[in-house]
Amino acid sequence: MSGNGNATATVEENSPKMRVIRVGTRKSQLARIQTDSVVATLKALYPGLQFEIIAMSTTGDKILDTALSKIGEKSLFTKELEHALERNEVDLVVHSLKDLPTVLPPGFTIGAICKRENPHDAVVFHPKFVGKTLETLPEKSVVGTSSLRRAAQLQRKFPHLEFRSIRGNLNTRLRKLDEQQEFSAIILATAGLQRMGWHNRVGQILHPEECMYAVGQGALGVEVRAKDQDILDMVGVLHDPETLLRCIAERAFLRHLEGGCSVPVAVHTAMKDGQLYLTGGVWSLDGSDSIQDTMQATIHVPAQHEDGPEDDPQLVGITARNIPRGPQLAAQNLGISLANLLLSKGAKNILDIARQLNDAH
């Protein structure tokens, strides 16, 4: 990529000795695996730099007895990491993109969105139900998920099942599934299971007609200080153009709907023959009411290029100066247009009721 050499020079010229880049991450095994993969790529690109990983616990890691949607905090898994960024204790933070709100606190930006892994949800079955699917599980089987989005869609599709909240990191949830008799199956992100090397636990991958995924699911985002130009240049080469455009569209859709983890909102995106397809939906908490639609826009996936600075480079919290601006704006407009279409069909009412019911329970 044309930008590598210049970015390397900029960062390395700041210090006569080898500069140490401090990378923040959550402490969970999955977060460490994700961060290690990003750092390995950066080390290969910038052999003249040293990288130090600093792990910390977040609010979402500490509160394990409450459903995520009930905690009422938009930055559950990011706030402590952002505080470290703000205090210059770390230079960049690696997140699961789906954990990053569509509006970031002032002074921060997503400087890179890495190539997306499989964004779909997966079903992991209790050992006694291996070989089953959600459809063939016995009546009243209990399925664990920490997500209102998954529960709403799957209740609608599989009314013979019961859905119950399950919290904890991947290891904890799998242990609860295997060692207790409460759950017949749990729903997890396919990407997380694959990154952990647990491909053999994936009993079923849910297709979009069964369960659309969360905004940004399967992609990693690298958050940096918005004014740290040398770090922005350094991580910018990690942007995967197709993933970037899909996620801009998804995040613009969610932001315009004013959705979050306290309401069921889901998406599905695809790039094909110069067209970006975005499907989005909103659901009532029990899945009985829903509005979904699909729109498309002509967007050619660009190659990275050298670009001059923009006055306001951020789109839905993302800075990508090495990707042409036109396709980014087209992706954002697609997300906004689909949100407006759903709002015109009554999405606001569904989301308002879902929010009120969730707050009341």
Image: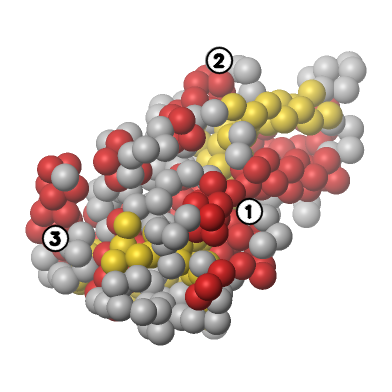
Describe residue 230's horizontal placement relative to residue 1 as left or right: left
**Amino acid at circle 2:** Arg
Left or right: 340 in relation to 35: left
Query: How far apart are the alpha carbons under marks 2 and 3?
Result: 40 Å
Residue 205 can be seen, yes or no = no
For mark 1, does the 10 Å Cα neighbourhood hold few (<14), some (14 to 19), or many (20 or more) residues? many
Q: Residue 350 carries which label?
A: 3
Report the side of 135 relative to 111 (left or right).
Answer: left
Question: Which residue is tagged 1?
Answer: 114
Relative to residue 78, is residue 284 depicted above or below? below
Res 171 seen here: yes
User: Where does the image place residue 65, in percent across and percent down from the top left?
Assistant: 37, 38
Mark with earlier residue (1, 2): 2
Q: From the viewer's perspective, is residue 27 above or below residue 3?
A: above
| Earlier sequence position, callout 2 versus callout 3 | 2
Question: Which residue occupies 46% across, 80% down?
Answer: 133
Toward the viewer: 252 or 287? 287
Q: What residue is shown with label 2?
A: 87
Colour mode of the rendering: secondary structure
Label 1 to label 2, Cα distance in Å? 25 Å
Q: Residues within 10 Å of mark 3 (few under 14, many from 20)?
A: some
Q: Is residue 91 above or below residue 323?
A: above
User: Which residue shows up at 67% across the image and 62% down it?
Assistant: 198
Label 1 vs label 3, nearer the camera? 3
* Rendering coords of residue 129 (x, y %): 50, 75
Could you tell me which secondary element the residue under label 2 belongs to? Answer: loop
